Amino acid sequence: MYKTHSNSPCFREKIETELLVVGGGVSGVAAALAAAREGVKTVLVQNRPVLGGVSSVEYSEGNARCVNGAYNYTHRNARECGIIEELKNANAWHYENGYSSCWSQVLREAIENEKNIRLLMNTEALAVTCEKNRIRSVSARGINSEMDYTICADFFIDATGDGFFAAAGAEFRMGREGKDEFNESLAPDEPDAKTMGSSISFRAIDAGHPVPFKAPRGAYRFETDADLPFRTHCNPRKGYWWLEWGGEVDTIKDNELIYQKLRNILFGLWDHVKNRGDHGADNYVIDWIAPITGKRESRRLIGDFMLSQNDIMENRDFPDAAAYGGWPIDIHPPEGIFSAGHPGSTPPFFFPPLYAVPFRSLYSRNIANLLMAGRNISVTHVALGTTRVMATCALCGQAVGSAVSLMKKYHCDPRDIFNAHLTEFRKLLQKNDHVMPGRPVPVPEDLVREAQISATSELTFGMVDPMGEETLFREPKSGLDPSDVPPEDRRQGQHILITSSRLDAIELLMNNRSSAPVEVTMRLRRDPFGEDLAVAAARVTPGERQKVRFDFSLELESGNYVFILDGKEDVTFCTSTAHLPGFFRKADGGYPDFNNMVFDILPPQRPYGVKNLQNDCGRPGKNSPNMWISAPGFPQSLFLEWEKEQEFDRLDLVFDTNLDEYRYNVVAPECIKEFSVAYEHAGQWHTLLTEKDNFYRFRRFDLPEKVKARRIRVDLLASHGDKSARMYGIHAYLKEMEP
């Protein structure tokens, strides 16, 4: 007996939902999670067998390391929070507990654990049905299941990268704007259809013995290193980001042609690495090649605002700031590997400040119920050079997913969020840990704002245990990386926070291995390259690990300062990797140095007070760490007290996962591991919740019933390694009071 299945009703399904997200990269995952957690019934369609796009196991071996963002170069404490930080925290925990290359699995678990999301994997969106300027449905096909879906929704998010919803008539651009249209210095003189190209990823392993390589037919030939200008290739293990081509053809229509040619380029490059010069690759063999291209650019859907180079470099203050970025304006040449110039932007690199992405760049200007997240948002070709990196895309995803919940609430479209509900929208992002540097959003309904708050201890800044040392003379830089150009002034320096009204002295732990005293000069400034506010000199006598005192005796305002040391031979300073927001080394090029000097400030500074928990910043700022840190030792406790009993049914705790330095496969030592919360009601203490294995920065607890309390106690019992307890915030809400 057999059955015929063609055209069987069980192979067709009509799905009615509130939101359809097409595209399962990090931006689509963040969008779907953000919407679903606010009660929006969501369908996520992904045309691949895994989630994560080019961060997935298909392209990057499933490693969150390639989910780059604002924190990768010059910016300090700039790592993206919210959903993308939550996912990275989970990835680190999985890795520490026996999972390798688990990023795609982390994303899938997050989606599948959300009750309001239906996930359709291996499903290709094929066509769009519209009425007037609104999308009504999308037809899709299950590649392996042979299922045909018609998905009807109220709202749609394009997270495909390629701007699939251009098929619905959404206005888009593809190519490069001319210099005059947006007055962009990095744009070509005339507009054209060229884009950045696509890359191919591979992995090589050491076989332990010489392995020959014979290039296959069709492989390109690179005779000498001169054929690969600016493209260092002495480390063959993880492939090369600059192995790129396709910007002069159509990166959508010609995708398979691009992949075929990239593979031939790869074989030619490997032939060069193995057979044409000594590249240290004799024992290496390619054991994996990505089956897909890593695409950087295709369509960009047009919103009510197009973000441009000048908006980014001038850090324009948008009232509808919905996300932020900080990656350099990194525009790859259309010729890819065949370009004679640098494979990234033509040096010198443009390093923007931590700029805002407006919400008006995240929805379509002519399709009323369409939003977008990822590399297809409303930006110019030049601006795409910085907004395209995945952590920035994830912030855009969380923003549009959150916006949909308000669109559902008010029965409105994206443009109405900007016109009528902007304050509520930005507050919703803030309350879900989507916090942007320097752009805090007040949340008046947070009960903690009005509480009396205290702690068992507060950390006073002081010398920490030294772990290494460095000279006052910087080591020369290779000059091979144009993104790492050192400044003209390469003197060593250290950023500090002053919380008192004066500075008496700075004591620095130093070594002098010469036989005679050496005089060292310290310059106090507001800016590393600004004017001296004061100068102090001190003699460093022969010896090791000695406290050297630089006297200032100044009255000054609290805030951020930096001291610069004039170089002297034979003198070194001690260093430590202790993470203390507000204190970091003077930059020496494009990459931050996470080793601080070991020093003390007199009088003692107390920047980590418990009152920091009551602001709306949620992350370090320029003039405050916005964090409470306890004195070393556990347990530590926080106490909140009100004049009269309060009522709440939601409690949020925000811990420190070190937003300055990302340890990709290690749970942040600074993160609190074990904690409990209790409340006092009618003179009795009651345990509200306990946690013994936390690894997340942001923890939300929706309580099963309202809690009445006049006092709350948070007991912090252990961290993942740090000696102190650390928190950015504690928030208590009554959900029915939320707008």
Image: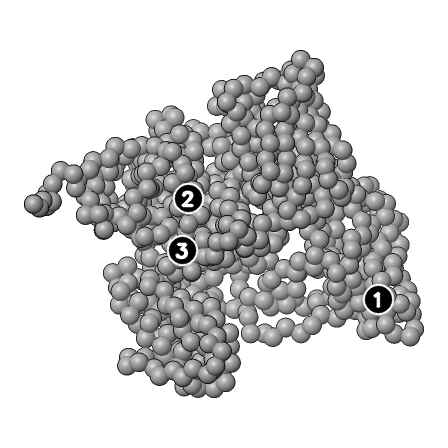
Whole-Å distance between the Cαs marked 2 and 3?
14 Å
Q: Residue 11: which numbered mark, if any?
A: none
Up the image or down, 558 lies above or below 236; here it is: above
Up the image or down, 389 lies above or below 197; here it is: above
Q: Earlier in the sequence, mark 2 or mark 3?
A: 3
Q: Residue 109: which numbered mark, if any?
A: 2
Dividing the picture into quarters, in which one does residue 677 lie?
A: top right
Q: Which sits in the foreground, 253 or 19?
A: 19
Relative side of 205 to 15, left or right = right
Dividing the picture into quarters, in which one does residue 403 lie?
A: top left
Residue corresponding to mark 3 = 56
Relative side of 682 to 346, left or right = right
Q: Nearer the viewer, mark 1 or mark 3?
A: 3
Query: At label 2, which amino acid type do we have?
Result: Glu
Q: Is residue 293 visible?
A: yes
Residue corresponding to mark 1 = 511
Relative side of 101 to 528, left or right = left
How is the model colour-coded?
one colour
Residue 525 image point, x, y percent? 76, 54
Q: Which sits in the foreground, 144 or 300?
A: 144
Q: Is residue 324 visible?
A: no
